[in-house]
Amino acid sequence: MTNPLRKRLQAGKTCVNGWSLLPSSFAVEFMAKVGWDSITVDIQHGLHDYRSAAECFQAMTSYPVTPLVRVPWNEPGIIGKVLDAGAWGIICPMINTAEDAKALVRASLYPPAGERSNGPIRAGGYGVPGAYQGFANDEVLILPQIETAQAVENLEAILDVPGVSGVYVGPSDLGFSMGLPPILDREEPEILAIYERVLAAAAARGKFTGIQNLTPAYAARMAQMGFGIVTVSSDVELLAFSAYTAVNTTRAAAGERAAP
């Protein structure tokens, strides 16, 4: 059994990633229908907990979409649980040093490469029954987030940690750590230079890259720059934007003033 997202990345294809903040398998099912390559269940800043994450993985099963999770922190318990529930990859926040990355790898991989406890309660159903433990270490994506100035300083050392699949850039916290506003779709020359450094360092090591984006246009630009995984907005933001557009298009057609 192979990780579909890993296979796509290895083929050099752009992976368009959805982002789930709402703890609703119903919402994720509708997200999964529209063609995302992967959907990340966000337990860090989203409203998800372990149970809602597992239910969302179940909702994705009928569609060709790869389930990922952003865990709340670099903590072995939750990392092991979401992998056991069926996540094919971990995005982990605030990985600032090689030691942080090593701890992430230990929590994500089975022995002898790591210290993940055996008990894939749902993931064990992937592939031939009983085979999961034999391929999990080769297929699970481990993506430390690069989102602080310290992480940028240690970028190459983080990428050199055995077991790390690549890195995922968090532009909002990255800029915030540098004294800039915490926003996405950044244009500051110093931030764009960091993106180029991330891409070059990952490419030199044959590793993957991802980045969080707000708009489709900026996500496409990041894909053209070379990022393999480009996240577009989130379910909450897409819902709000669609609702705002519907309300104000209707008001405009009825001759009423649009909402601010």
Image (cartoon, rainbow, N blue to C red):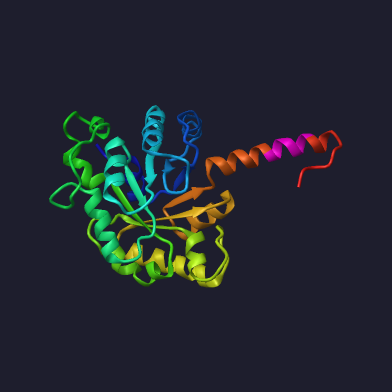
Where is residue 159? Give x, y as percent.
30, 63
Q: Residue at x 84, y 33 (%)?
A: 254
Is there any visible trace of residue 245 in the rendered image? yes
Residue 16 sits inside the magenta stretch: no
Instruction: Please give the range of residues in magenta.
Output: 244-250
Q: Nearer the viewer, residue 86 or 23?
A: 23
Residue projecting furthest to the right: 255
Where is residue 71? Give x, y as percent.
37, 48
Q: Is residue 98 above or below residue 5?
A: below
Q: Residue at x 37, y 29 (%)?
A: 58
Q: Nearer the viewer, residue 256 or 224?
A: 256
Where is residue 140? Give x, y as percent.
28, 46
Q: Residue at x 29, y 61 (%)?
A: 100
Q: Nearer the viewer, residue 128 or 240?
A: 240
Is there any visible trace of residue 205 in the rendered image? no
Where is residue 162? Give x, y as percent.
22, 59
Residue 248 sits inside the magenta stretch: yes
Q: Is residue 54 above or below residue 42?
A: above
The quadrant the N terminus occupies is: top left
* Total residue callouts: 0
Kindly report the secondary structure that dominates the magenta region of the rendered protein: helix
Q: Quadrant of residue 97?
A: bottom left
Name the side, left or right, on which 197 lies relative to 31: left
Name the side, left or right, on which 69 lies relative to 257: left
